[in-house]
Amino acid sequence: MPEGHTIHRLAEDHIARFGGRGVRVSSPQGKFSGSAALLDGQVLDTADAHGKHLFLGFPAAGGWVHIHLGLFGKLGFGTTPAPPPTETVRLRLVNGEHYADLRGPTTCALITEPEKQAVHDRLGPDPLRADPRHPRHHDGEKAWRRISRSRTTIAALLMDQKVIAGVGNVYRAEVLFRHGIDPYRPGKDISEAEWTAIWADLVVLMREGVRNNRIDTVRPEHTPEAMGRPPRVDDHGGEVYVYRRAHLPCLVCGGEIRTAGLAARNLFWCPGCQRA
């Protein structure tokens, strides 16, 4: 499932390609046909993202296209002329220069402003919606209040979209490693200073993810160039410390990276650097 930086990047990409102009909207698959007909020819005015939810705003039509890619959804762009769509395309946007195809989303629905607000209300704070001048600010404190009262592991809390939105398996594993925190430590045992550092780090790392369209979490002294090691080869891209590095040596202490299941996802950590 894409992490929050990907969704925020998709919001930016939609505005760059389609913003401020009328767009042809269709649903070759047919499941979004009624809503597509209402939007066809309307101006895509804005795009918004919160956690793993994408919203495309069509104010003249009085609504937002709410998209959640889920585990299998794909959203891709191309330049015109667009090829004939396949029957798997739920939503296609086209203008004179670009097209975008959405396939296999968990959610693709035309919603009202109050319905959009209801989605925001049920989500936790998103590090990518934080004020970069005050990264802790209100949002970080809101998440801290829930974490500091919880007996649930910090690893599970970081993946709970009601607690903090947009963090997925990669950022979860990497930020805990970067701060030397055992993923099984209960939320109530995380100090406020530790959480402040985690939140600020997520703000920086995820903004870099949007900018570079990939996840990089290693510090300068641990890059392939600095360490004289081959770069990581993985379909997620980016240089990381522990994610998908099970049984390999830790880049910092040399110990073996471990993996285990937690909350239906694979957890990765270094017992030497993240002591209980």
Image (spheres, grey):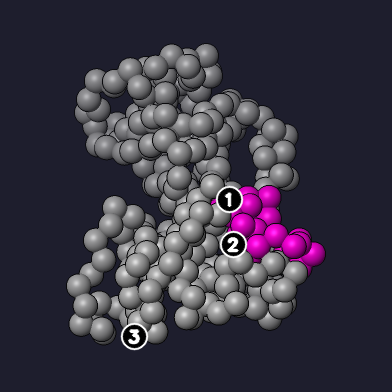
> In which quadrant of the rendered image does the C terminus lie?
bottom right
Secondary element at image label 1: loop
Q: Which residue is mark 1?
A: 263
The image quadrant that residue 80 belongs to is: top left
Q: Residues within 10 Å of mark 2 (few under 14, many from 20)?
A: many
Is residue 199 positioned above or below 12 on the image?
below
Residue drawn at x 72%, y 34% as measured from the top left: 114
Is residue 275 positioned above or below 43 on the image?
below
Q: Which residue is mark 3?
A: 221
Disc 2 to disc 3: CB gap under 8 Å: no
> In which quadrant of the rendered image does the N terminus lie?
top left
**Extent of the magenta region:** 144-166
Asked if residue 157 lies in the magenta stretch, the reply is yes
Residue 250 is situated, as x and y percent measured from the top left of the image, at 37, 77
Q: Residues under labels 2 and 3: Cα distance?
A: 26 Å
Residue drawn at x 59%, y 62% as measured from the top left: 155
Disc 2 to disc 1: CB gap under 8 Å: yes
Q: Which residue is mark 2?
A: 155
